Amino acid sequence: MNKPSQLATNPTAKQPIDVMLICALKDEYDQVLQVTNGLINPWHEHPDANGWLVANASFATPSGNPLTICTTHASYMGREQVQALASKLISENPAKCIAMSGICAGRRGKVVLGDVIFAERFWSYDAGKMTVENGEQRFQGDMLQYRPSTHWVQRMQHFNIAPNAEWLALRPQLPYEYQEDWVLLRLLAGDTNPSQHPACHKECPDWGEVLKRLWQKKWLEKPLVLTETGRKRAEELQLLHPHGLPKPAGFNIHTAPIATGAAVTEDPRLFDRLAENMRKVLGIEMEASALGALGDIHDIPVLVAKGVSDFGDAFKDDRYRQFAARASAECLIALLRAGEGLLPNRTARNTGILATSSPSLPSLSGIPRELIEVLAEQYPDVRDARALWQRAGGKASQVENMPNPRDLWQKLWQASRQGAAARPETILAEALADLPENETLQNYFAALKSN
């Protein structure tokens, strides 16, 4: 499929951007440009005002308001490069959201190659202090975590893709490891040359590469003799799967922590060590935490989706790399389209809420961003929020100890719309008792009364 992009010779005028989508590498960026589902205006690739190559497109959303995306990639992978690039771009073209797609290493046994992981939190696992005790180095980690809002996490948890999506057909069907296991079992069963087996073309289509890997793992001696470790592996497989190997799992999407480190990882024990402090970690990559820090400072949400291209060890299956990058881009853009109403000021910009030129009342569908901002600013402390909630008739136990007041008020407002004793009109009435001159509260209260 040819890349649907157009190269411009001159930078276009600046346009409002909903999402700045950053990739670490060019091949990840190339897969973003292959995403066409919901595309309204085709990807337009051009140099920006400073000569940096970017691509813009707009996508359809459930609300009917197009979602604008600007994407690009760094020249080199790593936290420093990506953070510097993102900082420069958003300072010149402010965006409502920073996003990242691409590839990562996945936790063996918890994910399969090609799966996509939405990061519900991310942190630098190699940030901390190195000490020496009894002549041995010990690392003490500093887990400064960044995470999207609870609303975005919930959207991630409910996200699904159509089972007939065309891009799913690009996923390799049989990992090398499945083919290796099939060869080991045939040899254990007495086959002198599994390549002559009638099912070899189906069960081990990549015979030559698989054979090299079996030699590299020292499970076979050349040409086709099981080593002691190879025989133990085969016997274990036979015990676990007496009726034949199960087919590899299908494509799946996970919502889980992703860890960021400075180095490319080939350490099969790293996930076990990380799980001692973050038991649900499923992915490792090299950039996400830097974007998390940038978004935190600028108060911009950061959404990260990574496709599993390997398991962080020496035995890569590079056939999955392109698909993993494509799958992460497809899922991330689909998530952004479905959840575009959660982007800061998105509703206000598109519907003209409280615009001075329009006397119309604000819409109460979705999350009323401007109202949430007022409540978060006026009642930022959990104790203040709990007091207002109780005055409105709610239970104190419903107000969680959440550090971000915006997240807290989004959750409380949603609860008020879904049957909590504290109703939207009583919350606004009590807030107006404290802030009778606040125009935002007045407008939303009037909108509620008119419904």
Image (cartoon, grey):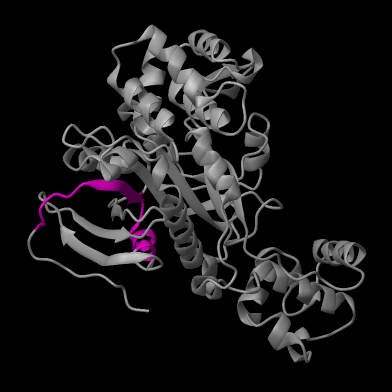
Residue extending farthest front: 450
State the residue at coordinates (33%, 35%).
Answer: 362
Q: Quadrant of the N terminus?
A: bottom left
Residue 192 x %, y %: 83, 85
Residues in magenta, as a range: 11-32
Asked if residue 159 is positioned above or below residue 288 in the image, the reply reads below
- Residue 259 visible, this angle: no
Query: Where does the image place residue 109, in percent across and percent down from the top left?
Result: 71, 52
> Which quadrant: the C terminus?
top left
Of residues 164 and 24, the one nearer the viewer is: 164
Residue drawn at x 76%, y 91% is 196
Answer whether residue 11 is visible to the viewer in this image. yes
Seen from the viewer's position, the closer of residues 133 and 24 is 24
Q: Is residue 293 above or below residue 315?
A: above
Reply yes or no: does residue 29 show up in magenta.
yes
135 up-or-down from 331: above or below: above
Q: Residue at x 30, y 47 (%)?
A: 20
- Residue 217 vs residue 289: left or right? right
Q: Position of residue 303 (x, y in %)?
A: 43, 43
Q: Residue furthest left?
A: 10
Residue 369, compared with residue 350, is above or below; it is above
Relative to the observer, which residue lies in front, 329 or 384? 384
**Which residue corresponds to the image point at 39% horizontal and 24% vertical from the top-left?**
445
Count of all numbered marks drawn on residues in the image: 0
Left or right placement of residue 294 versus residue 227 in this view:
left
- The reply to whether the magenta stretch includes residue 243 is no
**Residue 7, image quadrant:** bottom left
In the rendered image, which quarter is residue 45 located in?
bottom left
On the image, the x and y values in percent for residue 6 come to 20, 70
